[in-house]
Amino acid sequence: MEDITLREGLDGLTPARIATLYRRAPLLRPTGDRAAIERMFETSSLVVSAWLGDRLVGLARVLTDGEQFSFLCDLAVEPDVQGGGIGKKLMAEVLARCAGTELVLRDSNLSGGFYERLGFTRIENGWMKRL
């Protein structure tokens, strides 16, 4: 898609727009809690959004220390434009901005092939505790 523009930062993003994208993508995120969405994005290290005109069609959100580790929190693309290269464009920007770090992400089995095509390797060594 040639008309896609990428923006870094929170310009144009509202909790309502983000929640709508999360529901449609679908990403399992707190779409009913506006304050939680605001906190998630305000405290992120990197936010890159994809726009088709004034329509939000994709976004990537990252936490990073800028030296060793980066964590891709979200990658979401509207279903009606998936397959048009938007996810790849978002990931190319994330990879460029997080160069030199180890980029880690959690994923469902639905999009594993996408990450594998981008050169990611599945890992099994990790722990998680919900607080």
Image (spheres, rainbow, N blue to C red):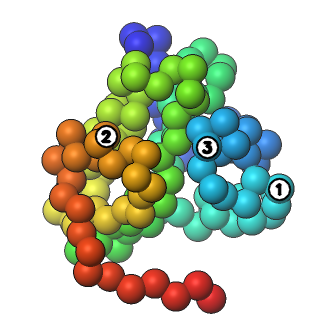
Q: Which mark is residue 71?
A: none
Q: Which mark is on residue 32?
A: 1
Q: Is residue 35 visible?
A: yes
The image's mark for residue 26 is: 3
Residue 127, quarter of the rendered image: bottom left
Residue at 39 percent across and 44 percent down: it is 111
Q: Is residue 42 left or right of residue 8?
A: right
Q: Earlier in the sequence, mark 3 or mark 2?
A: 3
Disc 1 is placed on an element classified as loop
Which corner quadrant of the image does residue 125 belong to?
Answer: bottom left
Residue drawn at 57 percent across, 20 percent down: 80
Query: Which residue type does callout 1 highlight?
Result: Gly
Q: Amino acid at mark 2?
A: Phe
Q: Residue at x 46, y 19 (%)?
A: 4
Above or below: residue 83 compared with residue 12: above
Mark 1 is surrounded, within 10 Å at the Cα level, by few (under 14), some (14 to 19) or many (20 or more) other residues, namely few
**Residue 93 appears anywhere in the view:** no
* Left or right, 31 with reference to 98: right
Q: Residue at image x 65%, y 22%?
A: 55
